Each structure stands twice: as structure tokens, then as C-alpha cells.
Image (spheres, rainbow, N blue to C red):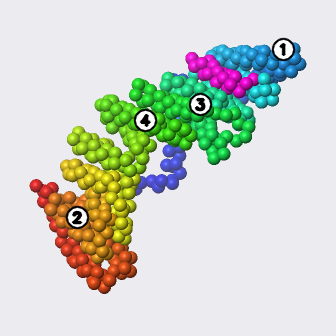
Amino acid sequence: MDRQVTSPELIAELSEQVRELRARLEVVERRLSLAPQPVVETPAVLAEVESQALHQAAGMVPVVGRALLGIAGAYLLRAIAESGMIPQLAAVAAGVVYALWWLLSSARLAAKGHMIAGAHAVTAVLVIYPMVWETTVRFQTLPAEAAAALLAAFVAIGLAVAWQRSLREIVWVTVLAGLMTAIALLVVTHNIVPFTVSLLIMAAAIEISACRDHWLDVRGIVAMTVNLAVLLATYLISRKGGLPEGYTPVSATALFLIQTSLVVIYLASTAYRTLFLHRPISTFEVIQTALAFLLGIGGALRTAQNGDIPVALVCLAAGVACYLVAFAFLERRTAHDRNFYTYATYGLLLLLTGTLLLLGPMSASAVWSLMAITGMYTGARWQRTTLQMHGVVCLVLAALMSGALRAATAGLLYGTATLPHYAPWLAVAAAIVSYTLLHTSDDRKAAVITASLGSWCSIGLIAATATPPVAVRSVMLIGLAVALAWSSAHWLRNELMWLVYPVMAAGAYKLLAVDFAEAKPAALAVSLLCFGGALLLLPRFARRSPKADAATTAG
């Protein structure tokens, strides 16, 4: 009989085996030099540890001392300038040279591995940025344009100094301080253009660095700051009462250049990284490019004085370029990856925006109907599902913008008359043609959308144009449901049967909300007979469709 697991003999035997395994493992670790050396806490060792700790603490004292000496030198320059011994601008120049010396020494010490390099970078920032603030705001000896140029130049020099050895502490210190100072000066001096341009230059410098895979983590905070500056500039200039009192006037050309520069900087950076460096587009780039277009193009529309045509042409050109990049370049190289879908989506959105701005709602909806047919045809011809889905988007927007969907619903349910216009009918024709082009496609979502728009809007627009009596409109609704069911069984298209249920639901709503309230007894009897007959007839078609599909699958 086996021994009990809790017996003393078994426990003692297991303990002995564990001790032997531990001893063997220590031998192996010693041979591999993996075992830590035992620390003997003798008085001499303890004294050495305490000495090292005191040495490290004492080493921080010179760091603080150097920083204080650097700041003291800056205050000495300020005192000399205030005393009138040298001109204010000469003091500013001396302060800039002094701050650059501290910045360069920070890079030199960081390259040698000294811990005090960060303190030197902070000292440089504490010298240059407060000096720019005081000479611009307090003494008003430095023009806003010169202050903005100094901020951008110091950030650019900081990036250049930190470039070779990727000294992150210098980048973060100089960039963050530069951003905060530029925003603060923009608000205090009420001068929008120079400091917004300074922020744009900082953003361009960071994006150039990102194109060489430097300091990607700094891009977010820089982009957020420059977005805020452009948004603030657009709001202040486009507000109802104009610029607030005390703000420096801004020309329409300067604002337009600022808005378009935001788009160019981030669009160029994203295009370079994704197309030339073959990097997958990041979440930051997707969001920031969209925000840049929204703030730049949307802001230009809000403040444009020459109409929407220039902005529309820019959108159209950018949309065509995005489509060419997606289908002529990215699709051949990487098939349908994240970059492809991003560029294709941007292309569609830009084309839609450009046509709407250039032509207006009705004419743009007509163009979108033609774009839907083109997308369906090219997608079916060359097996491009993306183009088919873009065609569906264009078709839905055309039906909404032209009023086809609204007029069809109001005319069929409530008998509301609508004046004829070519755009709604063109949207209906585009939906019917698009559905016929999808007969060989397995994309049932696109087929359902095109079939529903084509069938509902065609019957609804006829009702809206002819304005038949209430009973006739009920017959039209029930006839549409029966026609969809018969077509589903005859042509083996299951998506048509899916549409029968919402059409019958619309018929039930019309019967209860409209017919009982408005129809005469004879007309109400016709509506009830048609609805009841359809309820008896439709299940037969529903039973036939699955059998037909099953037979087709078996064949």
C-alpha cells in the first residue's frame, strides 16, 4: 500500500531532494557566472555603500549650482540692458548667444554620457524663452515677428543639435517650451500671424524629423498645438463682429496661406512616410491628416472672400491624386492594406466635397449619380470591391442630397406633390443601373442598398409626381412588395425578398396612419383587400426562393 502524502517520512524525503536540486543549480550558476555574488554586510562594505550614496547626492549639488549660475548670467544681461549700458537689442543678441552656448554644451555633455546634460538644456530654455517674453511683452523692444522667428529658430537649432545622437531630453525641453511660449505670446500680444507661422515652422521641422524616423512621439503634442492655433485664428477672423478690439489685422491671403500650410505639412509628411518609406500609415497620421483637412479646407471655406471655387478645385485635385496613389501605386505594391484604404477613402471624401462646393447640392447629386454608375461598372469589370462600395456611398448621398428619398417617401405615404427635377430621377436611374451591374457580384450589402433605393424611389417619385388617391398609393405599395417577392423567386435574388418585409411594414403604417384617417369606406376596403391578399400571396414566393437557391447551389 502506498505511503500517505502527508506522512513525515515522505515530507523529509522530498525536502532532501529539493535541497539537492538547489545545490546542483548553484553549481551550474557559478560555472555560468550567473549567480549573484554574495553580499557580505561587513562594516567596510556598509561604509562604502554610504559613501557612494553621499557621492551621488553631492554630485547633484554642482548640477543645481551650474543651473543657478546660468540663470544668474541671464539676469546679469537683463540688468545691464535695463541700466542702459548697452542697447536692448544688443542685450537680446547676447542672450541668444548665451542660451545657444548652454544648449551646445548640453549636447556635448550628453554625447559623453554626463547626467548634467539635461540641466544644461533646461538652463538654455530658462535663458532664451523668458528673455523673448519680457523683451516682447514687457519692454516691447522686440517686434512680434522677430520674437516668433527667434522661437522657431531656437527649436530648429535644438532639433539639429540633438539629431546625431537622438538626444531626446534636448528635443522635449526645447520643443515644449517653444510651443507654450508661442501660444502665450499669440494670446497676450494679440498678433495672430507671426506666432501661428512660428508654430507651423516648428511642426514642419518635427515632421521632417519624423520622415527620418526621429522623435515620432513628439508629433502628437506639436500637431495638437498648431491645430489649436489655426482653429483660434480662423475663429477670431470669421467671428460675426470681426477681430476683437486690439488684435492686429490679418489679411485674407495670410490666413489662407496659414490654413493651406497646415494641410501641406501633414499631407506631405504622411505621403512621404507611406509612399517613399513604405511605412504603414499610423493612427496619428490618419487622424491628424483628417484634422488638417478639416481645419485647413473648412477654415478656408469659412473665411474665403473669393468664393468656394479655389477650395473646390484644391479638393478635386487632391481627391484625384489620392485615387491615383491608391489604385495605380499602392494596390500594385501592397494590395489592399491600411494605406490603400486610407488613400482611397480620402480620395472619395475629397471628390464629394469638391463637387458639392463647385456645383451646389442638386448638380453635385447628379454628378454623384454618375460617379456611382462609374464605380459600379469599373468595380464589376475589374473586380474592385472598394470601387463598388464607393459607388454605393455616392448613390446614397445622391438620393439624399437630391431629395429623391425624401420626396419618394412623402409622395408614397402622404401624397405630397413634388415638382419634377432631373437630379432625383437621375439618382433613381443610377440605382437601377447599379443594381443590374451587381448581378454577378457576391456583395449582398451593395445589392440590397441599390435595389432598395431603386425600387422605393422609382415608385415614390411616380406617386409624388402624379399624386394619385390614397387607395391607389396603397395598391402601389402592395404591388411593389409583390413585385419584389416575384422577382426574388424568378431571378434567384434573395436580397429582393429581404426588401419585402420593410415595404409591407411601410404599407401597414400607411394603412393605420393614413388610410383609416383619410380614406373613404370604399377606398379603405380596397386597401384592406390588397393588403390581406398580399399577406396570403407573399409566403408562397418566400417558400419558392430558398428552394431555387438550394437548387442552384446543388447544380
Mark 3 or mark 1: name the one nearer the start of the chain: 1
Give the magenta part as a residue range. Answer: 142-165
Q: Nearer the viewer, residue 452 or 71?
A: 452
Residue at position x 27%, y 66% from top? 500
Mark 2 or mark 3: name the one nearer the start of the chain: 3
Rendering coords of residue 481 (x, y %): 25, 68
Residue 484: numbered disc: 2
Disc 1 to disc 2: CB gap under 8 Å: no
Residue picked out by circle 3:
254
Residue picked out by circle 1:
86
Label 3 neighbour load within 10 Å: few <14, some 14-19, many 20+: few
Residue at position x 61%, y 29% from top? 197
Rendering coords of residue 81 (x, y %): 84, 18
Residue type for callout 1: Ile
Task: Decide if residue 295 is on the left or right side of residue 530.
Answer: right
Q: Nearer the viewer, residue 320 or 270?
A: 320
Q: Nearer the viewer, mark 3 or mark 1?
A: 3
Q: Quadrant of residue 146?
A: top right
Q: CA distance from mark 1 to mark 2?
A: 91 Å
Residue at position x 38%, y 57% from top? 403
Residue type for callout 2: Leu
